[in-house]
Structure formats: C-alpha cells, structure tokens
C-alpha cells in the first residue's frame, strides 16, 4: 500500500468528477447513507481507496459512542473484554455500542455500513486481523480503530493489543518443573493460531533451561473447549508412562482435563498437576481451583479503548502494538510431583 | 399515580410559562441537552412529572440504537442477556448500547441523562425495579422500556420478563424425590429476593405432594456465589443425619457444593446428588456436569427487547408481565439415593 503524500491529497470534487457522480453522492457514501445504489457506492469506495482519501477536519466531535465488535459473543473472553471497554468508555462519558458480526477473521459488510452511518468516536475490534477494505473504509472516514487480539497475528501497522503468550507458556512450565515434574504434557489450541505456537515455544524453552527433554508425544493441539481438553487428556493419561502434569491452553480446556482425571480415578493435584490459561472466573470456581496463567483481558480491552481515544484526539500512540504481561496464579490444581506414577486401575 | 386524561394534556408553552423559562429551555431539558442549569432542569422535570407530560408524534424514527443497562456486568447472567438483546437488535437492524450503572435497584442519574440525550429506540433494563422518577423521565420522552427480572418483584404496571421460579423449585425437588431421596436440602439466595422464596415454595410443595416432611434445618439462605454454596454445604454435610441431595440456588452455588463434597470426601453423585439453577455454560463444563434448572435467559432478553420494539411501534403488548418456562436438564450430578449414608471420615 503506497499512501499518497499529503500534498497529493485529492478533493471530493475531483473524486466526484472522476467517478462521474455528483458531490452530494460522494458525501452520501462517506456518511454511510443508504440512498445510493450499490454499484455507485462500490465505484466510489474503489476511488476513495485508490486515492488514499482520508477525511480531515470534519470529525464529529459530538459522537458519544464507542463501538465494540466481536465475531463471537459466547466466547469465554467476551464478558471481560466488554467490561474493560465499558470502564474506559464510562470514564470518558461515552457509551459502548456492541455488535456481533462476521467470522474470526473479519466483521461482516453490514457492520461496516452501520458503523459508517453511526460515526462513532472510534472502534475496538476483537478479531485476528482487519481486512484491507474494511480498514480503508474506516480510515477514509477518519474513524480510529484498534484490535484486541489475544490469539492472532495482526499486521504490524494496525493498532493492536495482545499479551505475552511466550512468557505465559514459560512461567507455567517453570512452575511445574519447580514442583519436581519431569514428564509435563501440553495441550494447546489449534496449530494455526499464533498464541498456541508462542506458548509451546515458551514451554520448550523452560524445559531446555532445566535440562529436560522435549518430547513431541506430550504435545497435543486441539480446540480451546472442554472436549479439546478432555479427549487429549484421556489419550495422554492412558499412556503407560503417563505425564504427571498437564499445561492446558485455556481454563475451559483445563476443566476438560480435570474431568478426564476424574473419569480415570487420577487425583488432582496428588497424582496429576494441571495449569490452565486465561484466569477466567471459572478458574476460581473450579474444584480444585485452577492454577493458571493470568491473561489481563480487562486491561487489554482498556488499553485498546484508550488507544482509540488517543487516535481520536489526533495523537499517535507511542507503540502501535502492545503486549501486556501475563502472570502465574497458583491455586489448588498443582502440587509436588508424585514419587512414582501408580498404574491406572481398569476404569474409565 | 393519577395520569391526566388526554384532553387535559398540557402544552410545552404552558409548561414554559408555569416554570418561568423559555420554550427553548423546556425543549433542551426534554432532549437531554446539558446547557441548562441543574436547578432549572430539576424545576422543569418536576412540572413534566406533575402534568404527566408525554411527548407525542415527535418520535425520532431514525434511532437505530437499543439501550441495555445493567447494574453489574460481572454477573454470570450478563453474557446470556447481552446475547438475547443483541439477537433481536440485529434482526431489526439496531445496534445495542451497553451501560453498567447504578445499584441492584436502579440505574444511576448519569445514565438517565445520557439516555435522554441519545434518544434510543428503547431501553431494556436488568434491575429489580424502576424508580418512579426514572420511569417518568423515560415516559415523558416517549422512550419505551422493559425490565428483565430474573430475581425481583417489579411493579405490575411495568413491562417486565421473568421466569417460572416456583415451577423450577418444584421440578428440581421432584426429580430428586423420583431418584429415591428423602433428605433433600435446599440452599437458595438471600431471603429478601423474591425468586428465592418462590423456589423454596416450589420445593416444599414437591415434598408435600410426596408425603415427605419439610425440615427447616435443611433450608439455607446465602449469597448466590461459590462461597454461599460451599459454606452452607459444609454445615449441612457435617450434620450426623446429613442430606443425600442438595438443591442449590444457582449453578455457581452448586460448584461450591461440589467443592464442599470434595473436601469432605463425599462422592457425587454416588453419596450426594446436586441440582443447580440457571443452566449457564459452566454447568456443562463442571465435572461431573451439573443437573440443573434451565432458566431461559437468552429468550427472556429476546422477549424484553421485542416488548420494547412493540411499544415503540405504539402497540400494547398482550401482557405487561411475562414469565417464561423453566425446565429441568438432567446431567451427571444426580443419581439414585444411596442405601445408607456412610459416616464421614475425619477429613476436611
């Protein structure tokens, strides 16, 4: 993408002439009005994009809305993220507009049209990345945005907030090593999700630092849900030389590991230690309560919202990409490595 | 409250004269503008209220916002309710504005001012009831509203949606009786919350119908959190003639009961059956998965949102108060009553 130099900025009148439409039509497209034909709108969008048009000096200072858009409200993360954005919004006298739209990768086109018509103060997106056309549509209207990205790998020039996944994997594994465990399995998310790779690298580095071997048989990739934890744990725990500790990719997965242990009659933490990831409320509610890696979801959402409001004021954030620290929270699901692994009784 | 007859409706000019302010000041107060002094605003609000003023024919048909206001976003219910309101909003091309405000009983005054300025299509509130002044402020601006009320006891003339708590208590208890349990304890919410009383009445009726005695010693009132379940369960289970089943007031409380059982070495469901309430995601995630009473929170939120949109169109809902059905979901935490209660080992 080559942005035009400021002196080369095109005027709306020039755009109108090039598109063969009236100035008012251009203005309607910019403001998300629906009384413009779909083809005309598409033509104008292409020209806005080609010329790297960006509205200047016409910000609507009155907008009291901050947009938050998710692809999946039922995610276990959703509530924490909503709370963080809501905190910053209310500090600034703004209201949060919440939308569920699109896929893991991008919001749907109907959302983009809606947000242009609403002209919010800014947009916080919970997506792995933002497609180029969606990004250009926001930029051409001077609507600032930031991505909250606990999992993905957004483009480096997109404002985004994540957390320290590699360090999280390292801390969890070091904690288990410190407790005397030497056969430590890891169940993580899908292999194409960046956070999974980063955490497994942290896990490997902790093993290396302790002089312990990295055994591929002890690594499992699966979904972040309960069954992803349960099914992989059942396989791992039925091995003759089973692990004495499992580092799970999410608290929800860790609940699945707990269930697998219960089904097999393996006591936690006596015979098996479990570390979760995220530190959702459910980690405290679990029995035993989960030792887990705290992912600061509320703070991540707060930072993303602050970033948007800075951009709104015309200030550049010092860093476009921010990773907040993770930390280990030790509760009841981890304990000293057992002296010997008892053979499984014929159950489950 | 005596509403004036339609013929007695006051005009804005009359109100202005009575308040000794200009017509434009009256209009500013009605539209939530902030450039009016606090005293003037208060004076005008009192007059609007006294005259039962209600804006007519000036609805802003363009409003694409539906407001949702909570006193506590961290409630385990919050996400389900957001999802329900979001479903109906997106079906109708509306966006949801989310606010956390006030106490369990009413939203804060800053929210009321904000909502008047935003002029949304309508408001869904998650509160036990709506104070008269807040209600009047919404009515005088013709902003329709409905309450989602899983716990409280709103005034009968306030549009609200709840669920069948009495039937929920009855079904849970009957399920345990059908499994052969005769000593069934109940842990429920605070005694001043209507849903707690309704569920305990349902519990008692199920016992009566089966010819079982109602034993006050087996009823506990506590908070809806994990510790409310754990602490009460520890007391109940340490009794010499301990119950073989516990009906909890929420899934979260039920997790506390599970933890108490684990601490005391009592197996679930072998020696103790547990029934939760709400059917949140965590009920499925728990190990063993919880038998629970399904409270249709998503559908309740959808109904409240639909009620608001009907009122918006000038239609009267058939019923101002709607209780949706609860249902029993049987999972792994309940089983046949044990033949005999084994004495507790000296643990915990």
Image (cartoon, coloured by chain):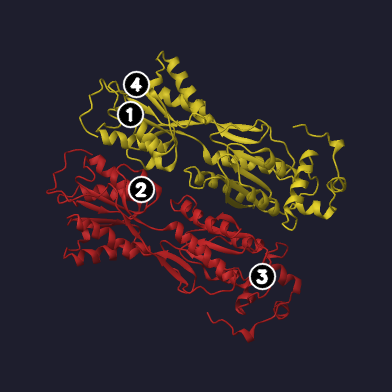
Chain colours: A yellow, B red
Name the element at disc 4. loop
**Disc nearer the start of the sequence (4/1):** 4
Name the element at disc 2. helix
Q: Which callout, 4 or 2, points to the residue nearer the camera?
A: 2
What chain does badge 2 belong to? B
Q: Check disc 2: other Cα within 10 Å, few if <14, some if 14-19, many if 20+.
A: many
Left or right? Give the position of A207 relative to A37: left
Rendered position, A275 above or below B140: above
What chain does badge 3 belong to? B
Name the element at disc 1. helix
Share a chain, discs 3 and 4?
no
Share a chain, discs 2 and 1?
no
Q: Which callout, 4 or 1, points to the residue nearer the camera?
A: 1
Quarter of the image for residue A334 reads top left
Name the element at disc 3. loop
Pinpoint residue B55: horizontal percent, then vertical percent.
65, 74
**Disc nearer the start of the sequence (2/3):** 3
Q: Check disc 1: other Cα within 10 Å, few if <14, some if 14-19, many if 20+.
A: few
Q: Which residue is mark 1?
A: A235
How far apart, in angstroms, are the residues tagged by discs 1 and 3?
Answer: 62 Å
Left or right? Give the position of B219 relative to B95: left
Whether the residues at callouts 3 and 4 have beta carbons within 8 Å, the answer is no
Q: Which mark is residue A181?
A: 4
How far apart, in angstroms, are the residues tagged by discs 2 and 3?
Answer: 44 Å
Pinpoint residue B300: horizontal percent, then vertical percent.
45, 61
Whether the residues at callouts 2 and 1 have beta carbons within 8 Å, the answer is no
Q: Which callout, 2 or 1, points to the residue nearer the camera?
A: 1
Rendered position, A35 above or below A331: below
Can residue B166 be seen here? The reply is: yes
Quarter of the image for residue A333 reads top left
Q: Which mark is residue B59?
A: 3
């Amino acid at each position: 993408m080559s942005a035009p130099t400021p002196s080369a900025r095109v005027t709306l009148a020039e755009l109108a002439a090039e598109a063969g439409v009236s100035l008012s039509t251009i203005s309607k497209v910019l403001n998300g009005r629906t009384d413009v034909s779909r083809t005309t709108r598409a033509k104008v969008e292409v020209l806005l994009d080609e010329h790297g048009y960006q509205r200047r000096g016409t910000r609507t200072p009155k907008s009291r809305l901050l947009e938050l858009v998710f692809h999946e409200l039922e995610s276990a993360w959703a509530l924490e993220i909503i709370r963080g954005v809501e905190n910053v919004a209310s500090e600034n006298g703004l209201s949060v507009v919440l939308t569920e739209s699109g896929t893991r990768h991008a919001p749907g086109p109907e959302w983009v049209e809606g947000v242009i018509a609403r002209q919010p103060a800014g947009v916080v997106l919970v997506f792995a990345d933002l497609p180029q056309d969606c990004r250009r549509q926001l930029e051409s209207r001077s609507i600032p945005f930031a991505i909250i990205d606990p999992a993905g790998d957004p483009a480096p020039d997109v404002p985004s907030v994540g957390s320290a996944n590699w360090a999280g994997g390292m801390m969890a594994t070091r904690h288990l090593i410190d407790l005397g465990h030497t056969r430590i399995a890891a169940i993580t998310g899908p292999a194409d999700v960046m956070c999974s790779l980063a955490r497994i690298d942290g896990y490997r580095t902790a093993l290396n630092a302790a002089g312990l071997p990295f055994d591929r048989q002890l690594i499992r990739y699966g979904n972040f849900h309960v069954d992803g934890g349960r099914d992989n744990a059942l396989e791992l725990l039925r091995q003759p030389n089973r692990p004495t500790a499992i580092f799970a990719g999410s608290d929800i997965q860790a609940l699945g590991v707990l269930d697998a242990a219960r089904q097999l009659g393996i006591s936690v933490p006596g015979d098996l230690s479990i570390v979760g990831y995220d530190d959702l409320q459910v980690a405290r509610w679990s029995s035993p309560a989960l030792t887990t890696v705290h992912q600061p979801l509320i703070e991540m959402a707060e930072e993303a919202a602050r970033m948007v409001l800075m951009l709104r004021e015309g200030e550049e954030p010092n860093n476009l990409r921010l990773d907040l620290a993770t930390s280990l929270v030790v509760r009841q699901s981890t304990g000293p490595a057992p002296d010997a692994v008892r053979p499984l009784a014929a159950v489950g």
